[in-house]
Amino acid sequence: MSTRPSTMITHPLRAGPVIVLLSLIYAFGALGIALPVHSHFILLTPLTLVASLLLTLAFHPGSRTRLWGYIALCYMVGFAAEAVGTETGLIFGDYTYGHVLGPRLWHTPLVIGVNWALLLYCLNVVVQRLLPGASWPLRGLAGAVLMVALDVLIEPVAIHHEMWTWAEVSVPLSNYLGWFVVALPLSLLFHYLFTALRNPVAIAVALLLTGFFAVLNLV
């Protein structure tokens, strides 16, 4: 049995209003992009990602030092992997980012690291909810699988709205393998560092992101 401290702590703030706010943001976002309300509406994507991450982390129970260290690592690893990918075609395949995701460094949007941190945190909180009795290695594997599954939904939407483009006609298998390889050690680390997390906002964001991309895949 693990001797690491549990992080089952009740947060003093109320998650309900925050979840309602995020639900409205994602609902209007999906409508605004699908209709489309305005050609520049999708440019709000980076702001939505940053807001989602900050609101999610505000409800994290337990050590803030450990949390911010983990989030910083996710950002750096995610951004570095994407930068190597765009510069060399390694890891994910040959792709290029458009202007939708905002300012870029080494042809890579700065906000892409936020995306990695947000997805890794939220999806692995979901894993802890779904697999409460599983070992941390099994949970880490499940987290990496969920990351790849969500990317399957993300890719068609991102390509259609010119967030990024692939040199190949279809998304290469190397992209999904790359996502798994990058996500696996970070997911394993999550479950080694944190146990029994209860963050309702993280679960809500995971569901909202899944619904958001599922809806946009249908329109």
Image (tube, rainbow, N blue to C red):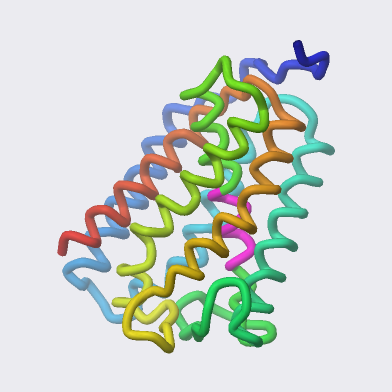
Which residue shows up at 54% across the image and 53% down it?
Answer: 51
Which residue shows up at 45% across the image and 42% down it?
Answer: 205
Q: Is residue 118 magenta?
A: yes
Which of the pair 137/109 is nearer the observer? 137
**Displayed quadrant of residue 135:** top right
Q: Write down the region rendered in magenta.
A: 112-119
Picture coordinates of residue 90, whole percent (x, y): 62, 79
Quadrant in the picture for the N terminus: top right
Picture coordinates of residue 8, whole percent (x, y): 65, 16
In the picture, measured across the screen, residue 219 lies left or right of residue 156, that is left
**Displayed quadrant of residue 112:** bottom right
Q: How many marks?
A: 0
In the picture, measured across the screen, residue 206 lies left or right of residue 50, that is left
Which residue shows up at 49% across the image and 45% down it?
Answer: 145
Picture coordinates of residue 111, whole percent (x, y): 59, 68
Q: Is residue 94 above or below residue 216?
A: below
In the picture, measured across the screen, residue 153 lies left or right of residue 77, that is left
Quadrant in the picture for the C terminus: bottom left
